[in-house]
Each structure stands twice: as structure tokens, then as C-alpha cells.
Amino acid sequence: MIYNKITYVPGNGDMVCEGYDLDKANIMGVLFDAVTLTQAVDCALAQMRARKKGYVVTPNPEIVYQAMEDKPFCDLINHASLVLADGIGVIYAAKILGEKLPCRVPGIDFAGMLMHRMAQEKMTLFLLGAKPGVAEQAAENLKKKYPGLMIAGTKDGYFKNDSEAVAAVNAAGGADAIFVCLGAPKQERFMSKYQKDMNVTLCCGLGGSLDVFAGTVQRAPDIFIKLGLEWFYRLCKEPKRIGRMMKLPLFMLLVIRKKLFGGKTK
Ligand code: UDP
């Protein structure tokens, strides 16, 4: 197994072997892992069982756009153990650019399946992020939904010093995994900087997932998800996201420009 990059053996998620790397899809400089949801979860579990530290990122077009503008941020995304395609725009971009990505792997679906499998193995999870009270409520809901899942502790995402958050995680005795839900790019920077200091194997950057697990934000109905319109549902629910979402058409234009004229990512 290549521990700075996860290895996946098709058909046997429990196994890892030397030198078998995941395929990559280069979307405007961000190197996505070409995996399905099940494969992504298998990889994450293999890494946790092996107790090899790493972090998972789930870039959507907005994050890819940020990475195009910020090389150090792009580098830390590309150093993640798993780079999952969260966002239908990433899949469209892959199609346009002729890169192979099997499907969308929304961070929240990854988290759901991961917790299901962690519960079967009685693994421990720490929840970091969102407004005060949200992570605690999410913990209560998740313990009921995934019996066997051990929640090591929670901490809201509005801490004054990063060291406060790191100390909270370690004071809880650490965990097999931590969901870091601070929004991008804060969560990616936090994970890459502090993974070594936290007594945790796998850090997962999952944006607003704790709000959904706590029930304070509703996920889009299935029909929106199936049609690739989850972004539109979120925009209708939270019109103030319009500024952020304007990056989506801009991103698609840059993708088309790259396809037509090649050259630089931006
Ligand atoms: N957040 C946080 N600390 C901060 C800024 C944001 O914990 O300093 C939380 C915020 O409360 C929300 C999440 O980070 O729960 C970001 O959610 P958003 O919907 O922006 O993320 P997305 O799912 O779009 O990536």
C-alpha cells in the first residue's frame, strides 16, 4: 500500500497491496481519485485499520476554482489521501476534458456510508465544526442512526485558536476518524496543518455536513440529487450563496476554454 496515497484492490476492500495506485482525473490541476462511493469508503477504512494518518477532501467546482487561484491550496488538496468529486460540475468538467471519473461522490454520502461501516467495527469518531450545539445534536442523532458508532467527542467550529480545537480532540482520547466541518478552505488547511498533532487516523473535510446530521439544515429531496440539481435547491433555500455559486458558471467557462485552447489551467 502506498500510504501517502491509498491503494484499492477491486473486489476486496479489506485488502491493500504494494504499488497499486488509484487512477487520477486531472480537473484544472486538481487530481481527483477515480473511485465510486463504495471504493472511497473501502479505501478510508483500509487506511484507518492500518492506522496511517491522512485526510480526505471533497472538492466541488467552487473549491477547484479556489485551487486554481491558490497554488499552495491546490497542493494541499493534491496531497490528500483521497480527493473525492463532490459536485455535478466536477463530473461535467471531467466529461468535457476527457478525464475518467466514474461518478459523483458527495461528501455527505461518503460520511454516511463510512459511519455505517465504522459502526460495524466499533470505531471512534470525533465531530469538529458548525455553530455551538450543532455537533452535539449531530452526535446524538448519529449514535441512534448508526448503533455501535462511538462518538469520542464534539467541538464547535468557532474556536479562537486552532490549538484549542486540537487540544479538545486529544483530551477526548483521539479517534479513528474526525469530521472537520469548518467550510472550505479553512477545513482543508486545518487538516493538512494539524493532522500530525491530533491523535486521529483519518481527517475528513465535510463542509456543512454536521448541520444536516443535526437536522438544522435539510438536504435536497432525492429528485434534485438524481437530476444533479442539489446546488440549485441549496441556492433556493439560501439565496445568499449566490455570490459563491457564481463561480460555477465561471469554472465551466474556464473548463471549456481549456478544452478548446488547451494550455494553462486558468
Ligand atoms: N463553520 C465553522 N467555523 C467557521 C466557519 C464555518 O464551523 O469558522 C461551519 C459553518 O457553521 C457550517 C460549515 O462550517 O456548518 C460550512 O458550511 P457550508 O454550507 O459553507 O459548507 P459546504 O457544505 O457548502 O462546503
Image (cartoon, rainbow, N blue to C red):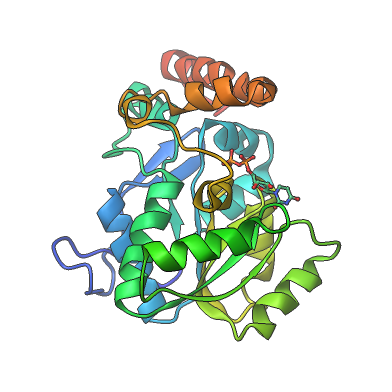
Task: Judge whether 147 appears above or below 262 on screen.
Answer: below
Q: Of 126 and 5, which appears nearest the observer?
A: 126
Res 6 visible: no
User: So how many labels did they put on this image?
Assistant: 0
Image quarter for residue 152?
Answer: bottom right
- Quadrant hosting residue 112: bottom left
Residue 50 in sight: yes
User: Residue 3: x, y in percent?
Assistant: 41, 72
Q: Residue at x 44, y 40 (%)?
A: 86
Question: Image point 38% across, 73% down: which residue?
Answer: 47
* Figure check: 195 above or below 93: below
Quarter of the image with the C terminus in it:
top right
Q: Give the quarter of the figure containing the N terminus.
A: bottom left
Q: Quadrant of ligand 1?
A: top right
Q: Residue at x 41, y 26 (%)?
A: 93
In the current view of this chain or complex, which residue is farthest to the left? 11
Q: Position of residue 60 (x, y in %)?
A: 51, 36
Where 50 falls versus 36 (above or below)? below
Camera-side residue: 50 or 235? 235
For this view, does 125 lie left or right of residue 189? left
Q: Please state the horizontal and vertical placement of residue 175, each as a whole percent of the image.
A: 53, 79
- Residue at (63%, 82%) from the top-left corner? 172
Q: Position of residue 143 (x, y in %)?
A: 44, 68
